[in-house]
Image (spheres, rainbow, N blue to C red):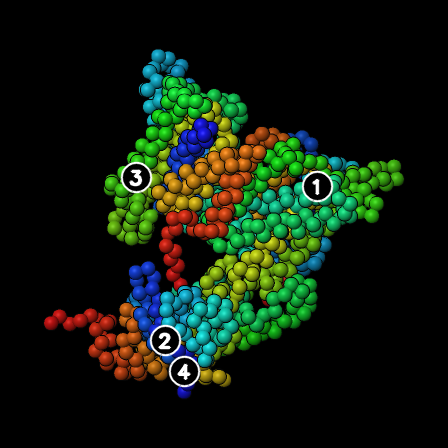
Amino acid sequence: MNPLLICTGLTMRFGGLTALDNLYLEAREGEVLGLVGPNGSGKTTLFNVLTGIYRPSAGKITFAGENITSGTPQEIHRRGIARTFQRSRLCLDLSVFDNIMIGNHTALRLDFFHNILRRRAFCRDYELWRDKAAEMLRALNPSLVSRMFRPVGDLSMIDRRRVENSRALVRRPRHPRLHDPSAGMTHDETRQLMDEITASRMGGDRLTVILIEHEMEVIRRSTSHCVVLNFGRKLCEGDYAGVVADPRVQEAYLGKELE
Amino acid sequence: MSRAAAIFSGPLGCILPAFLLLAWSGFFLTAEDQTSILLSLLSLAGFLLAAVRLGWVNILREAIAVQERLWDACLITIMLALMILFREDHYNLFLLGTIMAYATAVLGLNVQLGYAGVLNFSCASFFGVGGYTAALLLSGTDLPPLLALPLGGAVAALTGCVLLLPVLRTSGHYAALVTMAFALLFRVFLDVSEWFGGPQGIPVAPLTIAGLDFSQGILWGDAEFSFYLKYDLLLLLVLCLAYSITRRLERSWIGLALDAVRSDEVASACFGIHIRRWKITAFTLGNFLSGLAGALYAMMLAYISPANFTFADSLLFLSILLLGGIGNIQGVLVATVLVVIVPEKFQVIQEYRYLIYSALVLLMIVFRPVGLLPRKPRAYTGSPA
Amino acid sequence: MDLLLQYCLNGLMLGMMYALVAVGFTLFFGVLDVIVFSHGDTVMIGSFAGLATYWWLHSTYPGLPAGWAVLLVLLAAAATVALLGIIVADAMIVPLRKGPALNTLLATMMLGTVLRESIRLFFPDGSNPQTFPALLPGWSWRGGNLILRFDNLVLFCGGALIIFLVHMIINRTRLGMAIRAVAQDEEAARIMGVNFRFVVLATFALGSAVAAFAGVMNGMYYSEINFSVGLLLGAIGFSAAVIGGLGNIYGAILGGFIFAFLQTIGAVAIPFASAYKDVFAFGAVILIMAWRPTGLIAEPSSQRV
């Protein structure tokens, strides 16, 4: 399998703090890459650098053979990279449908002529997308379809996560990144959600996913390959069993045993 | 659903409230002595309170949502009926005109603040730019006077472009300062500038369209109707246009993009939404609407001075928006009517009106920050799905 | 040359006044992350409270020495305004901070109007400018065209002393430590046992007392006070605090002097149109914001994603 995404020598400094330190990382096409590491190890920073929110201090990011190192978030999204956020950044006062359509923004017609003057054409356009969104939601939780025009703020945590995942997936990106999909949910809910994500990967094209997750169980069930970060550097990588058994990983999480 | 509710979800649900509204406003505007004004205000307040308590407001809102065209027609009919009723009454026609001009300007502010979240503490300044543009164009050039309207809007939008860079780069309180500084600067500038007539202001020539002079009354048989009637009709047209544009804007992908920019810039950027593009769009469109309204308002006033366009007026526009419920254009209409009419009619409080008015807005912000009619989630095709 | 020096002296006086106002803005922003726009009107209330105190002193104790009068006027103004600040903070600003920041800004603007109108309507003859008494001896030193007034010197030094005191309170006392703790991280400060409400109210009392001094200083400098100065003073204080970078006391002081400097430049450099000095100053503020969007002394921006 070819690497779809390659980071070389990626470094991100905030003042005196080095959040990413000369990191090399690759994600192969079609795999689910688990990103683990203790708090402050640079996982979130990596996401933000990859999606163009931060500009890296040094290093290079290639996606599908093209250099995307200093792209804006908009340019990077256009190449097919979508993400979710650690603290789900949904627009809580907007409806479920609105939130999903925000993820669909680049597919929408945005000229004044279409939106303001040709209302009939717009309504047809709208109905098309409404049905598509309803179909997506029905696969996740049928009761969401009837609540499609309710504010997201009214939903439960797991439904919000579902909406957020739909928002990231609606454009059928080649490379979604999921950030802590389990935050704020119970074990059972997490398992359910991950099954849904796995199911959505089975349908049609196989997406390349980078997953940050604190629940090791989720990592074990969902990922084919893991990378462990610590202090902005790659501690080790491999499959789940190998990574968990690695003494360096245990040390990073639990601390060094007293001699 | 009870039988009464079933009846009022039909056309009657729009027509009856509209009729009541017309009857009340007709009575209120003709009332001369302070007791009957007070009584009618109290009865309105009591009626509204009862309506909220008994759920009539929700029935009305649903009836409106289902039969939007009918309700629009009702509102326009109310305005026309009031104009016909007061055809010889300068004062009331002027009040109606003021309401419509202010409502148009606040609709512009709503696009900026309510949708895109771009702070603007200088709405009255852009309103004034439109007014002064109209004044200078009508007196200094031979352009067709009707052109002064769109040009007033365009000049306001262009003036806004001067502020674009700082407005785009700053956020929060820093952005508030930029527009606030502009509002103060604009007022001082008008005050000291000879060219714009200084503190005394300048006269605005009346509008003429195809030989029709807007400063002359309308002769109808023996009666002569007030010249304000013409301005009111034109203002009604402009308001309907502005209202329809903002409503369509809200119910479109553009409205969605603006809302996304307001609620989370970082997340929006990650889904390919160009923050600057939409902020510029909203800011410019809003200023255009304010300037357009200002140009027409200036013509109706026939004389404008810097005192018409102060920072306090910008605050007034902002509080109308807040009072009505940010982002809800129906709320804008309701709040404009209340804010313009009540102090004007209530001569007892004339001296204390700024005090009472600001205290009321203050209480409103503390106890009901969402405004009178909070905005509902977007329904793209009008009726809720 | 003398004229230029005179302008500079006047500019320094103005700068000190603006700095005192801006310090309040930035203090409140520090602890609560809000802009209290009515602060300019607080200054105005301070000068009216001082005037009322003077009237009372003058009618009850006609022979009071000037030094005592100044002190009592200052104390009374500071106490009144500090009390006002505490009430405003407790009744309005703390409850409002759960909502959007714009609401607080608007609410305090409305509060400013309420204060302004109250003075206009309820202070005796409040709608007209009031003569503020010259409490300090009117000695002056003349050199050529340059006039150095003794009372201005005292006011300037007094202002500097107040700023120094604020600096000491913030940096050297337990209260100051608590204020800085709350400003940095409210949650953490609460957990560590800081009495949040007390700190907020104390900050408002402190900022308002400083404003009272600015108000009395304003009255003594112009020998006239007017109910309507609050709006412009508020806008200037806000500008100064923002130019310096909100939350930074030294930035606010710097911002105050910068604003006065801009006004002075506007008055000197465009001689044919010194009336444009405020246009120039506010225009410069807009330019500064375009250049440094978070003020000259910017806090490091941190946004969690």
Tell me where residue B186 sits by quadrant: top right
The reply to whether discs 2 and 4 touch (Cβ–Cβ < 8 Å) is no
Q: Residue at x 39, y 67 (%)?
A: A56
On the question of residue B300 being in view, the answer is: no
Residues at badges 4 and 1 in contact (C-beta under 8 Å)? Answer: no
Up-down relation of residue B79 to residue B199 (above or below): below
Spatial CA span between label 2 and label 4: 12 Å
Instruction: Tell which tag, 3 or 2, sits nearer the viewer.
Output: 2
The chain identifier of the residue carrying mark 1 reads B
Q: Secondary structure at mark 3?
A: helix
- Identify the residue at horizontal 13%, vertical 70% (top origin): A258
Picture coordinates of residue A105, whole percent (x, y)? 55, 69
Q: Which residue is mark 3?
A: C167
Which amino acid lies under the numbered mark 4 shown in the image of this protein? Pro
Structural distance between the alpha carbons of marks 3 and 2: 49 Å
**Quick one: label 1, few (<14), some, or many (20+) residues within 10 Å?**
many
Q: Which mark is residue A190?
A: none
Q: Is residue A200 above or below residue C150?
A: below
Give the spatial CA distance, label 4 vs label 1: 66 Å
Q: Chain of mark 3?
A: C
Q: Residues within 10 Å of mark 3 (few under 14, many from 20)?
A: some
Disc 1 vs disc 2: which is toward the camera?
Answer: 2
Per the model, the C-alpha gap separating discs 3 and 4 is: 58 Å
Q: Position of residue C99 (x, y in %)?
A: 45, 50
Mark 2 or 4, which is nearer the eye? 2
Residue pointed to by mark 2:
A8
The alpha-carbon separation of the residues under discs 1 and 3 comes to: 53 Å
The disc at residue B135 is 1
